[in-house]
Image (tube, rainbow, N blue to C red):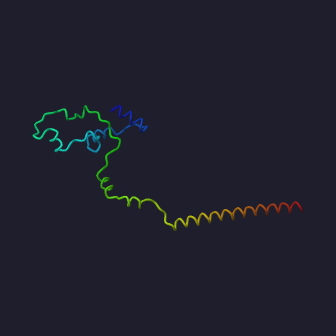
Amino acid sequence: MAEAHALFQVDHKKDFTHENVWRMVKDEPKWKGQSMKTNSRGQKKSAAGADGTSTDTSASIDCDEYEATPPTTRPKGKKAEKRKAKTTDTASSTLSFAPHPDVLAMGKAKMEMMANFREIRNRELDLQQANQQLKQSELQLR
C-alpha cells in the first residue's frame, strides 16, 4: 500500500486521500484487474473435472498473497457499452461541427466590413493630420 501511495504521489503530485473508499470497493468486479476475475460456474466445473471430485488447490488464487498489477484502464460500465453499441459511424460523423454556409458568408462579410472600416479610419486620420499641418503652415505664414 505504501508503494501504491508513492506511485500515486509521483503520478498526480498530491496525496491519495480516499484510502477508506478504496478498501470498500477494492473487491468489487469493476475495480479488479483482468487476471483477478472469477470464472463462471461452468468453467470451474471443467477446471475441477467433470465429476467435481478433484481437489487440486494449485488452480485457486489466494488474494492476500497474489500481487496483481492494477489495470491501466478502468473497465467500461454497462451504460457506456450500450451507448457505444447504439451509435454508428454515421452518427458520430454528424456530431462533428460544420458551420452553415450562411454563417460562413456572414463571417466573410463581417471581415470585409471591418477591413473597410479600418481603411476609412486610416484615411480619416491622414486627413486630420494633413489638416493640422495646413493650419500650422497657415499660422506660420501669418
> Residue 78, relative to residue 67: is it above or below?
below
Quick one: quadrant of the C terminus?
bottom right
Which residue is depicted at the point 15% across and 38% down? 48
How many numbered markers are drawn? 0
Which residue is depicted at the point 70% across and 61% down? 122
Residue 110 placement (x, y as % from top left): 59, 65
Which residue is depicted at the point 46% across and 60% down? 97
96 relative position to 117: left or right:
left
Which residue is depicted at the point 35% across and 59% down? 88
Question: Relative to the observer, which residue lies in front, 98 or 131?
Answer: 98
120 relative position to 137: left or right:
left
Question: Relative to the observer, which residue lies in front, 120 or 72?
Answer: 72
Question: Relative to the observer, which residue lies in front, 116 or 94?
Answer: 94
Quick one: quadrant of the N terminus?
top left
Question: Relative to the observer, which residue lies in front, 3 or 76?
Answer: 76
20 relative position to 139: left or right:
left
Task: Quadrant for residue 106, please give it.
Answer: bottom right
Task: Quadrant for residue 126, please give it.
Answer: bottom right
Residue 78 placement (x, y as % from top left): 28, 52
> Residue 139, relative to residue 21: is it above or below?
below
User: Residue at the bottom extreme?
Assistant: 102
Residue 127 placement (x, y as % from top left): 76, 64
> Residue 104, relative to residue 25: is it above or below?
below
